[in-house]
Image: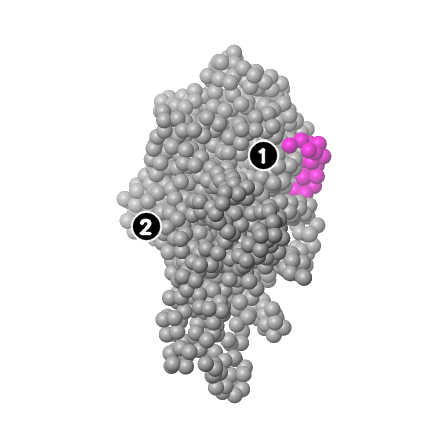
Amino acid sequence: MAVVAPPRRGRLRGLIGPDPIGYAFIAPYAIFLVALFGYPLGLAIYISFFDYFFAAPGAQVARPFVGLSNYAEILGDPTFQRAILSVAEFILINVPLTVVLSLVLASTLNAKLPFRTFFRTSYYIPYVTAGVAVIGVWLWLLSRGGLLNGVLGPLAPDPSWLVSEFWAMPVIALVVTWKGLGFYVLLYLAALQNIPRELYEAAEVDGAGVIRRFMAITVPGVRPATTLVVILATIIGANLFTEPYLLTGGGGPNGASLSPVLLMYREGIEQGHAGYAAAIGVILAIAVMTISAINRFVLEKD
Amino acid sequence: MSRASVRFASIATILMLVLTACLGEDGQDGGGSAGDGAASATGPISIWYSNNPEEVAWGEAVVTAWNADHPDEEVTGEEIPAGESSEEVIGASITAGNTPCLIFNTAPAAVPQFQVAGGLVALDDFPDGASYIQERTGDRAEQYKFTDGKFYQMPWKTNPVMIFYNKTVFETAGLDPENPPLSTYDEFLSTAETLVAEGGVEAAIWPSPDAQFFQPWFDFYPLFIAQSGGQQLVEDGEPQFNNEAGLAAANFWRSLYDQGLSPNEAYNGDSFGDQKAAMAIVGPWAIKVYGDKVEWGAVPVPTQDGMDASEVHTFSDEKSSAMYTSCENRGTAWEFLKFATSEENDGQLLELTGQMPMRADVVASFPDYFEANPDYEVFADQASRTVEVPIVPNSIEMWQTFRTAYSESVIFGTTPVEEAFNTAADEIRTLVGGS
Amino acid sequence: MATTSATETAAQVARSEPAGRLSWGRVLGLAVLVLGAFMFLFPFYYMVVGALQREPNPGISGAFPNPANLTLANFGDINAQVDLLRTLINSGIFTGGVLLATFVIGLPAGYALAQLHFRGRSVVFNAMLLILVLPFQLFMIPLYVVIVRTYGLADNYLGMILPFAVNATAVFIFRQFFLQLPRELFESARIDGASEFMILRRIAIPLARPAIITAGVVTFIGPWNEFLWPFLITKQQDLQPLAVALANYISNVAARAANPFGSILAGAVVLAIPAVVVFVVFQRQFVESNLGSGVKG
């Protein structure tokens, strides 16, 4: 049956599109976005150009315009540079590990093995659990006298994990990877459904082993999913806050696990330099968007 | 993103920025900060105090007593979390304009920030404001004035920081539990070695090695104050912590960390209460926490060559009460503040919490209490020799800068102490002098 | 491009590697899964064990609960300071409010973004993506000022709910799902004279049930575990959700309890359980293909 397009009513329709009812549907959400995010975002960008701090209502305070000097100061600040490096270290560990582990787990889950439901559930459980709740356990597991060191015995590093300048960030990366895997396994499982079974059957007939099948069929087959996973994991990594805040109270040994967002929180909320903190946020957002664009470009070129 | 939507988005963004610039944040509101007339206005008020259970008990008692006599000026009390997050809560609240009239948990280090944000009322505005404070607190009141000479806080209670030690552990280690050798740096260090070797503890003393801005108040600052005979971190805009006394105190801590007598890893919980550390550096509020868990004793913090206990100064760990500009019924607030800090209610504070009211002579004012609780007398005596944080602009950033330098040089030993302290001193001089 | 239905979806899930014989591949696969499951579940097991201990035992032996050391006292200890029931209810109200707003506002929005064409559609979509990218801390203080000063919603459930009200990820999921549905399905309904609202209510939403559940579980996690925002917004103890109360308890009050670590873990167990239960109950419907449809392009 041929589809009949709705009659166009001249110029107006051309301007606003064929389904203006869409405005009604989208309006509450659009209002929500503007009122609750648009205005604060605008305010945040605005104050990043000032020596700004929040004051009591009606208080007369001087907030001089400083142009780009907040930005210049941040980029030259060694603490900020350190934070960027820490987050880069985090991403370099977390993203590849996440991609590999979640794809391996997803394809294993995809096979018809017993107790699949149980396994699937167990992978999602860390994902649905509160950061606050899990931190306590990890703090205990990773402490000097904790279980991990007990198991490792003489191999346990000294200084211990969370206080070691070397290990603090990698440990956080591992904990965050552990926590987030469930979500990415989900993404990959979905993508795996789109790979035709015939490909695997044909390969098996040709004598290809499990690993060969994985590398030749699965990995290329889920390329779009991999792009998504990389981008999402990078964004989440760049915005890392909860784990450094809770696990290494205040930025770790010598600032080894200070993340830019934690720095933003410290400057903006603890020390009241709202303009400076907002500038950090803007720089971070631009960096993240740039990296996402690069990731997308690199991963999707054929 | 299509070109059209990029265009649309950019226009929208510019519009948003312009709109924000015009509206600003100042143009948003009509009132909030009451005018001069409020100084005498009376009526219901609300107050906040910390969520420490004993303080809550005190707060509720005082509020009930007041409300019984002043039905038209009812006071409502609420708890806010104590600890590092209280400054954030208060700061956010000032911005929002919904601070209560009085907050009994205002940290002196945060007062400059709150004042600059226009959140605090100068108590000098009240005719008997300055005089009441000076009469109640005596000489120490001077330390609580802001750079403009006014009182934006009323010093309320202090927890003079001393060295708590575990008598049982000392005995096990073969040390005298009644006269522990802890008054000079050398003595302290060798005692610490003995404790770790023979006392069955993981650490001699375990101050938190974390990087937050307030941590120096419980390791470096008390020892610096003692060693320098009562100096503040900066005085008259000039950093003092990198002088001889400061370096001596810092190097003392460096030895403790270096020899593993203090761990550079944070303990999750209370190391002294859990008997992982033989000593703790803390004030009398901790007595209620330790309860019957530990048999404790307390001595003043050590100095390089030892001083008579009656001469050692220490950090006050003080909390003030402040009046906030969102208050409309300031007359009532001031009267309530005086009521809450009257001799009777100060005495109740002492009884319920064991913390020292900032009164000129605590021991003489409450002889019955100290007869019944001789344990606390040493703290009351120490309370007359406390030093406060400097009430200067950018004070929180100042402490954060210091802590970062201290952490990298003393706790982790990656930079030489003198170098780190001198660099920090230069930064801090700019911060407090006027940027 | 057949219509997606529950049966079709189930068939898609079933499409997987050939089952059957016990091959080296299968054994390897099982081993990987078991190891993975152990690593994921062990911390939770340890959490429960720790919550039940009378005396904290951080060593290896502590992993194997000693019956003599078991007690429920830690739960009592934390309940004395933090009213577990009350805070759980608050968490429920907070999360429930967010779920409600997400469905009521997000479903039509997702549908409009996918199936309706109007100018400005991609602007809204890109704005939504932008929200996903930016950290919440960037907005936090300006948002606080807006909500408390301009809207006057401090110490109020609504103030807590608003910034989280419509979860962007959920809207994304709805949009991806509705994109999958063929336009013809709706065209024929329109030709039959149905209004857009009716189409939404009678056709789109019932079809979207798997996406709704997926989005629901994803949306649930955010507010349930959020501890920073409600902390700023509410001072009153009886409004605070459990995540906030637990975070405060850890930093301030825990030292008073008989077994501070145990009582922290007890609170953590109470916080974690409802989220896990919700997930386990709904996980059968939490079908992978919904989220995955966005992965295709």
Amino acid on which the number 2 mark rests in the picture = Glu
* Residue B209 in the image, given as x and y percentages of width and height: 57, 33
Q: Which residues are magenta?
A: B412-434
Quarter of the image with the N terminus of chain B is: bottom right
Q: CA distance from mark 1 to mark 2?
A: 56 Å
Given residues A53 and B364, the one toward you in this image is A53
Residue found at x 54% / y 74% = C120
Q: Which residue is mark 1?
A: A161
> Was residue B419 drawn as part of the magenta stretch in this picture?
yes
Q: Residues within 10 Å of mark 2 (few under 14, many from 20)?
A: some
Residue B68 appears anywhere in the view: yes
The residue pinned by badge 2 equals: B73
**Way the structure is coloured:** one colour
**Considering the numbered disc 2 on the image, is that residue within a helix, a strand or a loop?**
loop
Q: Locate residue A16 relative to residue C241 in the image: left or right.
A: right
Query: Can you give x and y, in whole percent of width and height, for residue A254 in the image?
Result: 63, 38
